[in-house]
Amino acid sequence: MGGAKVTLHDGARVAIIGGGPAGSFFGIFASKLARDMGKALDLTIYERKSFVTHGASGCNMCAGVVSESLVQTLALEGINLPPTVVQCGIESYYFHTLDGSIEIKSSRLSQRGIATVFRGSGPAGSVAKGIQSFDDFLLQKAIEHGACVKRSFIDRVCMEGDKPELYSGGNMLQDCDLLVGAFGIKAGTGKMYEDIIPGYKVPPTVKTAQSEIELGSDWVAHRFGHSIHIFLLRIPGIKFASVIPKGDYITISVLGKDPKADHIKAFLNHDAMKKFLPSGFKVPEKFCHCFPKISVGAARKPFARRTAFVGDASSTRLYKDGIGSAYITAKAAAHTALLHGIGEKDFREYYFPTCKSLNRDNLFGQFLFAANHLMSVVSPISRSYFNIVRCEQKSLQKNTPYSDILWDMFTGSRCYKDIFMRTLHPWWIIYLLGAVVIYPFKKAVFSFINR
């Protein structure tokens, strides 16, 4: 299957479509591995955007949170995020419900191991200096390792003969020995590859809403601190909203059925959010916002002879740690191409298992987020669960199972299967059910005594 054995020879031409994290990671790992093997690659990354501009034109439209596990992994790879890239180091999560708020810290977290970043050089209208885009930082790393970046939009790919041919505006740019699709989940681009790659199908998506609100660094530091805030408020059309501190700004991410700008405004006008905003704050007439799509499923057959798809164009973790998924898939694809070959059979045998592992794990994630949504709308369960977590957080020890489940779900620090299996522990279920029964009873007794 997939034809005769084909490998990347010395001087092979590799074209990467997309200069976001997945494309940059592939460029970094393929270049490093080729050098270690004594090979030279002619590697070109095609990316139309310049990540040094403000607003949507220079941004990859993402919440911009780099998980603690990825920060540590990148450091081991020799990729250390500089202060110009990291806007805030996160040490805790706050969860806000209609029944109250709670701060959660992980006993595992080493200092401020989670990083918040801008995917471009700042929001539209921003005049802040000293901000470096996370995507630009990674792209520069790829260039340092030998990749070339061309600001061309690939609008046509042909599979004439044995090699892919790339076109832009009717002009052929090059043919290549290996084509790497790192274009995310752009509908038009994905459809182009569906038409030419037998069996490939882009992942299913949902729309999110994101915005950047300027409050000033002093206010952001004072009211939001080094914490990401998760709001579970039962606002119509919103499953949950997160607020992420980034210097002078907060990034608001809203997940719902079909979120719009009005949902962002409704969240900002909610009493639970108002107490975090300056007195008299009014939602600006114009503010930086976008409606990016996120993957909620897996691509079908993300590989072919001389072709591999990575990052969001292939497989990514449900709702969390998309940058981490880009790292995992890009590294697996690069190692497959250099160590095993670039035939369809090679990618199926050595790359696809990585994708399937992410896809299977997301099945557990779907259950966990559905259960979390149910808990957030059923007050007795929500109150009881958060009371248990509150008790754990009063004396943070190594064994904080209920806190760790929430932490790992919303930070993306652990695989969903691991989290799911922990929720099935008999004592976890018994203790939670007991709290659901006992808490209302204790509250009634306390009210009776204090009459």
Image (cartoon, rainbow, N blue to C red):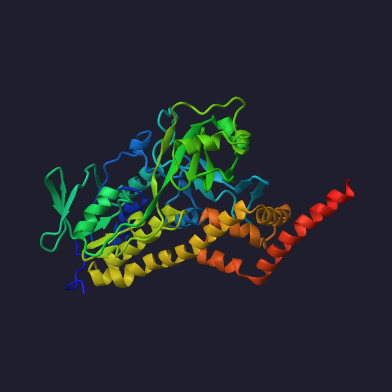
Image side of residue 258 versus residue 303, left or right? right
Q: Is residue 255 above or below residue 400?
A: above
Q: Nearer the viewer, residue 213 or 283?
A: 283
Residue 366 appears anywhere in the view: yes
Could you tell me residue 38's position as x and y percent?
25, 63
Q: Quadrant of the C terminus?
A: top right
Q: Is residue 229 above or below residue 413?
A: above
Q: Quadrant of residue 30?
A: bottom left
Residue depicted at 56% across the width and 69% down the height:
421
Q: Quadrant of the N terminus?
A: bottom left
Give the side of residue 246 with respect to residue 78, left or right: right
**Count of residue discs:** 0
The quarter of the displayed image where residue 409 is located: bottom right
Residue depicted at x 67% and y 60%: 400
29 left or right of 390 in image: left
Nearest the camera: 268 or 352? 268
Q: Residue at x 30, y 40 (%)?
A: 49
The x, y position of residue 414, in whole percent, is: 52, 61
Residue 40 image offset from top left, x and y in percent: 23, 59
Q: Nearer the viewer, residue 411 or 83?
A: 411
Q: Residue at x 54, y 60 (%)?
A: 368
Task: Check the image and report above or below for 293 versus 12.
Answer: above
Answer yes or no: is residue 13 visible.
no
